[in-house]
Image (spheres, rainbow, N blue to C red):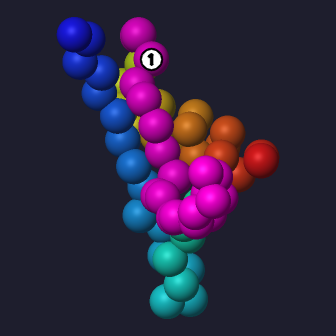
Amino acid sequence: MTIRNSAKAIIVKDEKLLAIKIQENGGTYYILPGGGQEHGENLHQALQRECKAWCRN
């Protein structure tokens, strides 16, 4: 089994929390932006990359 580090962001603006809405398999749920750390990057870099990727979609 491989263990992989990940980071999630808590982004609040004007008392509103940024969350990603996912709709699949007949259900809806919300997640915080973020994701897995790639080889050679620190967690801060991983979080920046993942947040940019989520915000483009």
Label 1's element?
loop
Task: Give residue 8's position: percent from left, percent from top.
Answer: 39, 49
Q: Residues within 10 Å of mark 1 (few under 14, many from 20)?
A: some
Pick the front one: 39 or 1: 1
Q: Residue furthest bottom?
A: 15
Residue lying at 22% horizontally and 10% vertically, measured from the top left: 1
36 over 57 or under it: above or below: above
Q: Is residue 40 above or below residue 47?
A: above
Q: Is residue 4 above or below residue 29?
A: above
Q: Is residue 18 magenta?
A: no
> Is residue 52 shown left or right of residue 4?
right
What percent of the width, then of the height, locates residue 9?
A: 43, 55
Question: Image point 67% across, 39% down: which residue?
Answer: 53
- Asked if residue 45 lies left or right of residue 7, the reply is right
In-front residue for pair 6/49: 6
Please report the bounds of the magenta region as a residue range.
Answer: 21-40
- Residue that lies at the very extreme toward the right in this rendered image: 56
**27 with respect to 46 (left or right):** right
**Residue that badge 1 annotates:** 38
Name the amino acid type tagged 1: Glu
Q: How many marks?
A: 1
Q: Is residue 5 left or right of residue 23?
A: left
